[in-house]
Image: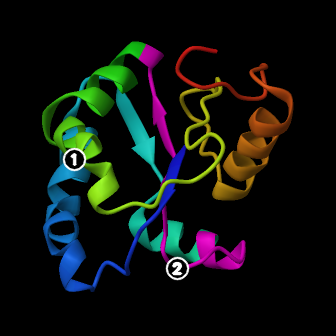
């Protein structure tokens, strides 16, 4: 799971480049080797709202075959290009913005589980519960 707090709602003019590219970026993920699944957009919005998150929180929970294919997608192509420009659209936040943990290929994690694991990572450091890129 990765998350960030957008500087403005996606409908704001300053967010237009990012907003108009999201479908293509998600499509590239879904076509990338190693991708298995991600929480669909409509479920993501519902789950984040149910957890009481600010509507400017942008987050993705996805399942990949392995860390290397996730890393390849994250830092290359369109996603990598937008990630390099993240400060144009996202606030700087304290603490980890990414949590990774092992799941079965058929498991479908929720945002509640992901944010619990993120909090555990923040409070206790890397563990089987969750880690960052290097943990």
User: Where is residue 114 drawn, in percent x and y?
Assistant: 67, 47
Judge whether 9 appears above or below 38 on screen.
below
Q: Is 15 displayed left or right of 93 in the figure?
A: left
Q: Look at the image and give the residue range highlighted in magenta.
A: 48-67
Q: How many marks?
A: 2
- Tell which of 124 and 60 is nearer to you: 124
Q: Could you say where residue 29 lies in the image, as x and y percent from the top left?
A: 26, 40
Residue 63 in magenta? Answer: yes
Other residues around mark 1 within 10 Å, as few (<14) / some (14–19) / many (≥20): many
Secondary structure type for disc 2: loop
Q: Are dots 2 and 1 in contact, CB under 8 Å?
A: no
Question: The N terminus appears in which quarter of the rendering?
Answer: top right
Which residue appears farthest toward the right when viewing the image? 124
- SS label for mark 1: helix
Q: Which residue is mark 2?
A: 55
Q: Relative to 74, is 15 above or below?
A: below
Instruction: Write down the quadrant of residue 15 in the picture.
Output: bottom left
At 44% across and 21% down in the image, what residue appears? 65
Q: Residue at x 25, y 23 (%)?
A: 33
In the rendered image, the vertical position of residue 114 relative to residue 36, given as above or below: below
What residue is shown at x 38% (from left), y 14% (from top)?
A: 68
Residue at the spot of label 1: 82
Coordinates of residue 108 in the picture (x, y in percent): 59, 45
Q: In the picture provided, is 122 more to the left or to the right than 93?
A: right
Which is more N-terminal, label 1 or label 2? 2
Specify whether residue 124 is in view. yes
| Number of other residues with Cα within 10 Å of mark 2, as a class: few under 14, some 14 to 19, many 20 or more | some
Q: Nearer the viewer, residue 80 or 28?
A: 80
Residue 66 in view in this figure: no
| Residue 6 sits in quarter | bottom left
Real-space CA distance between mark 2 and mark 1, rounded to the nearest whole angstrom: 20 Å
Question: Which of the numbered marks, if any, corresponds to residue 50?
Answer: none
């Amino acid at each position: 799971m990765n998350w960030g707090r957008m500087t403005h709602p996606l409908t704001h003019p300053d967010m237009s480049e990012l907003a108009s590219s999201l479908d293509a970026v998600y499509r590239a993920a879904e076509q990338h080797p190693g991708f298995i699944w991600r929480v669909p957009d409509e479920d993501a919005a519902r789950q984040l709202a149910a957890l009481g998150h600010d509507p400017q929180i942008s987050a993705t929970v996805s399942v990949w075959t392995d860390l290397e294919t996730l890393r390849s997608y994250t830092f290359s192509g369109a996603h990598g290009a937008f990630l390099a420009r993240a400060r144009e659209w996202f606030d700087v936040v304290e603490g980890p913005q990414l949590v990774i943990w092992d799941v079965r290929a058929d498991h479908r994690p929720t945002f509640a589980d992901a944010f619990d694991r993120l909090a555990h990572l923040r409070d206790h450091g890397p563990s089987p519960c969750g880690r960052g890129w290097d943990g």
